[in-house]
Image: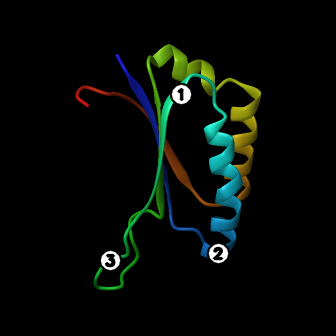
């Protein structure tokens, strides 16, 4: 069963500073071992101008849950999480079993 890790990244206080830091965060995510695919997305602004429920999503795909679990236990994952936490932007991380692609 394929697994993906989804990061729902909330709206930062300083969008420009976050986007600058995100380039490095995304580069670290790309270095996680045994991933099959990496997908980064920016949430569209709402038409009425109200805040979006999140700023970005980041999906990292793996062949198995075990591969995903092993990847987040690596030194590069430690650096990834450290950089993401340093942005002081709340996020939620979800491990999901992909039922249909």
User: Residue sitting at 47 percent across and 64 percent down?
Assistant: 55
The answer to whether residue 14 is above or below residue 33 is below
The percent coordinates of residue 54 (x first, y second) are: 43, 62
Quick one: label 3 or label 2, which is nearer the N terminus? 2
The image's colour scheme reads rainbow
What residue is drawn where x is 51% and y is 14%? 66
Q: Name the residue under label 3.
A: 46
Spatial separation of the CA atoms under disc 3 and disc 1: 32 Å
Q: Quadrant of the C terminus?
A: top left
Quadrant in the picture for residue 50? bottom left
Task: Give the number of callouts.
Answer: 3
Relative to 43, say whether 71 is above or below.
above
Q: Earlier in the sequence, mark 3 or mark 1?
A: 1
Residue 27 image point, x, y percent: 67, 46
Contact (Cβ within 8 Å) of mark 3 with mark 2:
no
Q: Distance between the residues labelled 2 and 1?
A: 28 Å
> Between disc 2 and disc 1, whose residue precedes?
2
From the image, tell me which residue sits under label 1. Answer: 35
| Residue 14 in view | no
Q: Is residue 31 at least partly visible in the picture?
A: yes
Residue on which disc 2 sits = 16
- The structure residue drawn at horizontal position 31% and vertical position 27%, both measured from the top left corner, is 98
Residue that sits furthest to the bottom in the current view: 48
C-alpha gap between disc 3 and disc 2 = 19 Å
Left or right of 23 in this view: 9:
left
Determine which quarter of the picture holds residue 76.
Answer: top right
Residue 85 at x, y = what percent?
Answer: 69, 51
């Amino acid at each position: 069963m394929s697994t993906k890790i989804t990061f729902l990244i909330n709206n930062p206080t300083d969008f420009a500073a976050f986007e600058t830091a995100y380039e490095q965060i995304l580069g670290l995510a790309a270095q996680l071992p045994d991933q099959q695919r990496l997908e980064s997305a920016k949430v569209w602004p709402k038409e009425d101008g109200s805040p979006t429920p999140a700023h970005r999503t980041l999906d990292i795909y793996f062949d198995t849950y075990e591969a995903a679990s092993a990847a987040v236990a690596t030194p590069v994952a430690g650096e990834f999480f450290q950089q993401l936490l340093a942005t002081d932007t709340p996020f939620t991380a979800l491990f999901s079993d992909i039922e249909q692609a």
